[in-house]
Amino acid sequence: MLRRREPVPFAFVAEADNFRSNVTPPPRERLSASQFVGRTLLGLTVVAGLVGSLVLGMPSLQSGDSATRQQQSEASDNR
């Protein structure tokens, strides 16, 4: 395998941790009322979907006697 004899040309990358900028980033813009309401409704919709899927899925996750019983139709009872 060939070895490079010259130094790495990107030595400044190693010094990037020591770099301090004197430029402050601009302040974050505040959300408007409609953006805030929209994000809140989106969050509530996601949470309601998760809770709804949990509520609807719980009966199928329960183990009980109903799974071992044989299902019979009402028509076979009244012969």
Image (cartoon, rainbow, N blue to C red):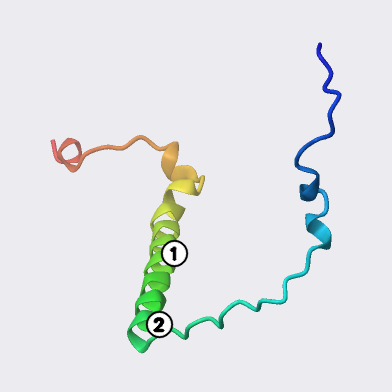
Q: Which mark, residue 36? A: 2
Q: Quadrant of the N terminus?
A: top right
User: Quick check: 4 above or below 56?
Assistant: above
Can you give x and y, in whole percent of width and height, for residue 66 in the image? 42, 44
| Quarter of the rendering containing residue 24 | bottom right
Q: How many numbered circles does the render carry?
A: 2
In depth, the one of 5 and 76 nearer the eye is 5
Quadrant of the image containing the C terminus: top left
How far from the left and from the top, in percent, is residue 41? 36, 76
Q: Quadrant of residue 26?
A: bottom right
| Residue under label 1 | 51
Give the amino acid type for the residue marked by disc 2 in the picture: Phe
- Residue sitting at 37 percent across and 69 percent down? 45
Q: Answer yes or no: do the residues labelled 2 and 1 have beta carbons within 8 Å?
A: no
Residue 51 percent across, percent down from the top left: 44, 64
Residue 66, compared with residue 27, is above or below; it is above
Q: Residues within 10 Å of mark 2 (few under 14, many from 20)?
A: few
- Which class describes the residues within 10 Å of circle 1: few (<14), some (14-19), or many (20+)? few
